Amino acid sequence: MNNAIQPADLGFFSVLAGAGSLSAAARELGVTTPAVSKHLAQMETRLGVSLVNRTTRRMGMTPEGELYLEHARRILGEIDGMQELLGVSKGTPKGLLRVNATLGFGRSHVAPLISRFVRKHPQVEVQLQLSVNPPALTDDSFDVCIRFGAPPDARVIARHIAPNRRLLCASPAYLARHGTPKVPNDLIKHNCIGIRQGEEAYGLWRLSTGRGKNVTTEAIKTRGNLTTNDGEIAVNWALDGHGILMRAEWDIERFLANGRLVQVLPQHATPDADIYAVYPQRHQLAVRVRAFVDFVALAFKKQVGTA
């Protein structure tokens, strides 16, 4: 069908979906409710599908409407990015910004930063999605991913945001009952809390001593009766005295500071999990992306400086 999708429809439908009702969309667009209803009906007629389920009080997206909205917002975001690349790179950050982060870290650290960021840049619309593992590098669903570790791929830009060590820890109560490991091999005798995340081999902890050419690394296959894919749950189990945990310093530093957790085998280093902001090369000049990454980097730098 000719002209089934018209450019003006994309912005209209995005506003409609965000408003939640025909009358609210009419107020935001500065038109009458019948005008909004007519525009929507014309879109559905051209497409030959229903986009919205209407009731007297509520409005919901059909599966086709959800699909239309997803692509409309992506296209609108790309248009904003193109405008910036064509010469408005010094303009005000605005448009759709899709951010991905891991569950626990995203909830405790990234979400509060987004709250402050949109207060400073109200013309940016941020969509935050939390996931257990970072999305594939070929996934075009996000503009910025906050993740642990730099991806070995030249197709994306990985900006180092903050250092982040993995540490072994346990509660004082657990260590009082079961003893404190003196060497890495002692971990085999302990209950170790497992976290299934990312592509790392599950339950295999690597501990190193020395520096440079003198580094010696031991790989210890741990075991335990508690496993989860949620880091916050694992930390809570460690706080409850169930075992030894390997976790990022950002997640446990407050518990180490107040004594609820104690570092185990501090003389041995574990693989780093530095924090990176990862985004496609095509977004490197987009104002909203650059502004967000700069904002996050500065916030973490201040936090590291005051730690």
Image (cartoon, rainbow, N blue to C red):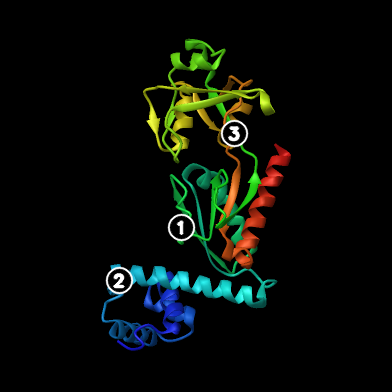
User: According to the image, label 3 marks what residue?
Assistant: 249
Q: Position of residue 49 (x, y in %)?
A: 26, 78
Q: Is residue 19 left or right of residue 209?
A: left
Q: Secondary structure at mark 3?
A: helix
Is any atom of residue 35 visible in this view?
yes
Three-letter amino acid code of the residue under disc 1: Thr
Q: How busy is the neighbourhood of tag 1: few (under 14 within 10 Å), some, or many (20 plus)? A: few
Query: Callout 2: helix, strand or loop?
Result: helix
Q: Position of residue 216 (x, y in %)?
A: 60, 22
Q: Which residue carries the number 2 mark?
A: 64
292 vs 29, left or right, is right
Of the 4 image quadrants, the one containing the N terminus is: bottom left
Q: Give the residue type at disc 2.
A: Glu
Rendered image quadrant of residue 268 = top right
Alpha-carbon distance for marks 3 and 1? Answer: 29 Å
User: Residue 138 bears which disc, if any?
Assistant: 1
**Percent from the top left, x then y, of residue 297?**
66, 51
**Residue 260 visible in image:** no
Residue 284 quadrant:
bottom right
Residue in the image at 61% along x and 32% along y: 253
Work out whether 217 lies above or below 307. above
Q: Amino acid at mark 3?
A: Glu
Q: Earlier in the sequence, mark 3 or mark 2?
A: 2
Q: Nearer the viewer, residue 57 or 186?
A: 186
Q: Earlier in the sequence, mark 2 or mark 1?
A: 2
In the image as oriented, which residue stretches furthest toward the front?
A: 213
Dot 3: few (<14), some (14–19), or many (≥20) neighbours within 10 Å? some
N-term mark: 3 or 1: 1
